[in-house]
Amino acid sequence: MTHILRIPQIDLKSVLEDPNPHIDLKIQAFEESTASFLKAVSNYKNRSVQQITERRAKGAAEKKKIAEKCQAIEAETNQCKVKEIELMTVMEKEQNERKEAELSVSSLKRQLSALHEKCAAIEAEIEQYRAIADSLQRERNKERTTLKRHASHLTPEVDVLETALGCVIEGLENNQLLVRFTRIDEFDLDREFSFILDVSSRSYKVLKTSPPLPTLPSLLDVLNLTGDINRFIVDIRQAFYKMVNA
């Protein structure tokens, strides 16, 4: 359960009457609560990203396996069709000798029936794999809905924290993160600084920074070495701060 810090009621008159006026803002408690919340959000995000990555890899492997199986089935089906044509050709060539032709036709019909049964079995197997693929897609949609529902529960508290910290993190398409900062420029606290981080692979990339950040390459090298995205965001903010307030 999240504990919300409440600002205590202050008796201004009694404070002013005190020879040494002092108001306890409980800053340490606020910082501890903020750090705890950030850690919880980070852990949740990391677990979610790991789960999504594992399920995506599993789904891709299964999809590849199904595609290879379908290709093999299609090739075998084509072979069956070629075999059927060859059998018909043999039947036509043996029409000159009726008795032998009848025996051959009977044999070929049996083989043809077996081929049709095999084709039917292959088609049934294809339908089974299609059902598996549909089931995987439904499971993926269900997981996506669950993630959205969890995210909606965190939205109010995240909004408050983002405003206090001057940092907003948004998910973009193709596994990209947009990170926006404010409260950096001491002369313009509303001025926005941002960057886009590509997390689609283990080699992280920064697609864009606004404004340009000269120290970005060295910070990116550290990120790819440690994999610590949270530390990277903090380092980027500090680099922006030093750049504009130097």
Image (cartoon, rainbow, N blue to C red):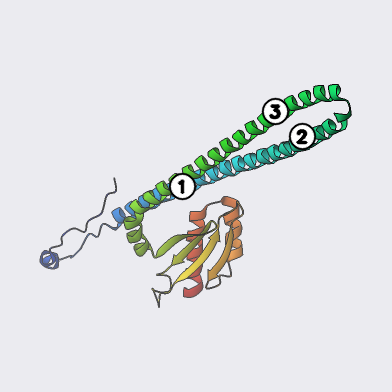
94 to 60, vertically: above or below = above
Q: Earlier in the sequence, mark 3 or mark 2?
A: 2
Q: Where is residue 71, by image quadrant?
A: top right
101 to 28, vertically: above or below = above
Residue 98 picture location, percent across and down: 85, 25
**In this rendering, would 41 be left or right of 136?**
left
**Label 2 close to label 1 by CB (< 8 Å):** no
Q: Nearer the viewer, mark 2 or mark 1?
A: 2
Q: Classify mark 2: helix, strand or loop.
A: helix
Amino acid type indicated by mark 2: Glu
Q: Which quadrant holds the N terminus?
A: top left
Residue 32 seen in render: no
Q: Classify mark 1: helix, strand or loop.
A: helix
Q: Which residue is mark 3?
A: 113
Residue lying at 74% horizontally and 27% vertically, measured from the top left: 109
Amino acid type indicated by mark 3: Ser
Q: Earlier in the sequence, mark 2 or mark 1?
A: 2
**In this rendering, would 185 be left or right of 197?**
left
User: Which residue occupies the foreground of this view, 141 or 201?
Assistant: 141
Q: Which residue is mark 2?
A: 84
Residue lying at 29% horizontally and 53% vertically, measured from the top left: 29
- Which label is found at residue 141? 1
> Local crowd at mark 2 within 10 Å, few (<14), some, or many (≥20)?
some
Q: Earlier in the sequence, mark 1 or mark 3?
A: 3
CA gap, disc 1 to disc 3? Answer: 42 Å
